[in-house]
Image (spheres, rainbow, N blue to C red):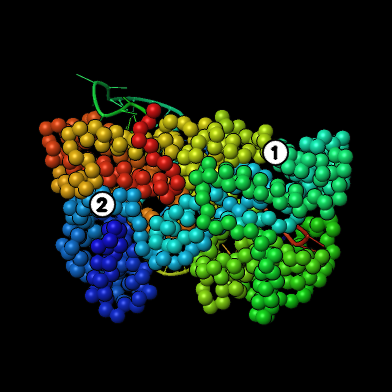
Amino acid sequence: MTDNIFADIREAVVTALAHVVPDLPADISARVEVTPTKDAAHGDMATNAAMVASKAARRKPQDIAQALVQALSGTGMIEKAEAAGPGFVNLTLHAHALRAQIPAILQRGEAYGDSTGGGGVRVNVEYVSANPTGPMHIGHCRGAVVGDALANLLSKAGFSVTKEYLINDAGGQVTALAWAAYWRYLQAAGTPLTEAEFSEIVPGGLQYRGEYLIPVGEALFAAHGPSLAENAKPADPALWFVLVRDTALTMMLASIREDLDLLGVHFDVFSSERELMETGATDATIARLEQLGLIYEGTLEPPKGKLPDDWEAREQMLFRSTQYGDDVDRPLRKSDGSNTYFANDISYHADKIKRGAQIMIDIWGADHGGYVSRMKAATRALAGNDGVQLDVVLCQIVKVLKGGEPVRMSKRAGTFITLRDLLEEVGRDAVRFTMLTRKADAQMDFDIDAAIAQTRENPVFYVQYAHARCRSVLRAAAAQMDTTPQALAQAPLDTLADPSEMALIRRLAAWPRMVEAAALAREPHRIAFFLYDLAGDFHMLWNRGREDAALRFIQAERPVETAAKIALVAATAAVIRSGLAVMGVTPVEEMR
RNA sequence: GCGCCCUUAGCUCAGUUGGAUAGAGCAGCGGACUUCUAAUCCGCAGGUCGGUGGUUCGAAUCCACCAGGGCGCGCCA
């Protein structure tokens, strides 16, 4: 027996199938599925066992189905088995077997649905990894929520999960940040220059013009006075660059961590790209690839179609990613001899493997989609026979709407809506839940009004309301009975028999299976939809109590029935909390 | 030009990894409050799953081609 009633029944089916079809190859029985039925007329569960075994057994699916029906009917939890359609076996469980999930849920509480299926395999989930060059914005937010929920989901599914953030504190963006922070410093020092005049002396021009760097400039001036400039005019970068850069990085990272904290996202590991580079890790990684014969000096074909203005053929160090399924080989060195970002990123992934990751999952923005195949190629090259695997989850763009109109500007950041703006307006729970109401690889419209609306349209509200209703009933019931989980788990449940009660129990029993399937697919949004459906089942049952007094949860004259119903309500609340915990959303006790 | 992602009801989206008659919400129409909060619920109506072929017992799902939308395509990270 496990928490997962589907896994239990599947075991029974596979065992029966082994009797019906001796010598069945293992890969065939691995394909046997036991799934919930869509239609209650088909019983509680259906299995495809007869159909997947048909070819290997050289028997008609219907024949095997008939034999399975014989073998399974009336055994264990199965009350009835029927062959149907092209070879399905529909299973109807004893009602008491389904009801038995309720005490199981009450005993486990939020841990219900925890699985050992992951086998403790070490998974590294890397997400956000925003450049520390400014505040977090809406684009980062989706990746943060999806990554965090996926990491929680994998933990629940029995994987050993590390949550990791890579600080991209190297490269040209950081140089640009230093110059932008230096501009704010000059302003704090009372420079006579205009922004345009300053921009002319900045290599590549002034970037990052948002107001968020003003505190950095002020902090630099407070700490160092006018000493980093010459009469409030730009001084030799040798005098200030490292200091300004590091101050800006430190303050930006602190601000990002504050934002993440407000979002409820916490990492186990922060890795620094610059530290990794300074240890020479990238050169070591390139040397290793060279040993594998995967490095050569060569010239890439120009991209087809419209050429970049400054295109010229150029020989550079290339990685044979085409050997691992990529379209073209990829450069590891720029023309000035420094490493490309790709080279550093290979090295970073090698580092994650070295630290013990068996599965790496990267959460990226959709604009990095073109990068997936080369990084997977690099991982395959590095992993050799160890079988370390890289999965990439791409998060598509989020458009923020308010009153149906796109929202773009942020006062603080200038060009984008910040995470903090959104959190202030919508709140953490609604942001997190709403971000999980779409598949990651589908574009999302985030409507601020819809996210805070208190109607069924808003799944955040609808699920929270269901939980609050559960708690409300439990508070009321506590006046006349012991409502602790331990006490409720002892309640006789035979009186739970109404179709809407049984439908709710079936939904609850499907939760462990949902956790495993969503974790396998790396799709945390499924949790949001499951909870929405579960809330619907509960609201329906609640309202049926208005029409039919026998379905009301608290019935003063009938303590036995009441105890059973309250146990069901408590189990419902526990599963909702279990799901919300994966999503990082706080369950509410009452609506106000 | 090439690669990746997407296309499902009027609108916004699910679809349990290839299963049975494709499901929700909104919008539309009709109902349910003396009650554990009606912020909810029930019913009706709404579909050529972008298109055409293919794979097989079986396709919204897999493959090929086509159309439309998004993202990307050597010294950005």
Residue A398 seen in the figure? no
- The answer to whether dots 2 and 1 both sit on one chain is yes
Dot in front, 2 or 1: 1
Identify the chain of the residue marked 2, using the numbered disc in the image: A
Residue A245: x %, y % from top left: 74, 50
Q: Is residue A268 left or right of residue A213?
A: left
Residue A574 seen in the figure? yes
Q: Which residue is mark 1?
A: A215
- Who is closer to the viewer here, A147 or A442? A147
Identify the chain of the residue marked 1, using the numbered disc in the image: A
Q: Residue at x 34, y 63 (%)?
A: A33
- Who is closer to the viewer here, A492 or A60? A492
- Who is closer to the viewer here, A257 or A173? A257
Amino acid type at image mark 1: Pro
Q: Is residue B48 left or right of residue A363?
A: left
Q: Quadrant of the N terminus of chain A?
A: bottom left
Image vertical order of residue B43 relative to residue A2, above or below: above
Disc 2 from disc 1: Cα separation: 52 Å
Q: Quadrant of the C terminus of chain A?
A: top left
Q: Residue at x 27, y 43 (%)?
A: A570
Amino acid type at image mark 2: Gln
Residue A71: x %, y % from top left: 19, 68
Q: Which residue is mark 2?
A: A107
Other-residue count near label 1 (Cα within 10 Å), few / some / many at <14 / 14–19 / ≥20? some
| Element type where label 2 sits in the image | helix
Q: Dividing the picture into quarters, in which one does residue A419 lie?
A: top right
Residue A155: x %, y % from top left: 42, 58
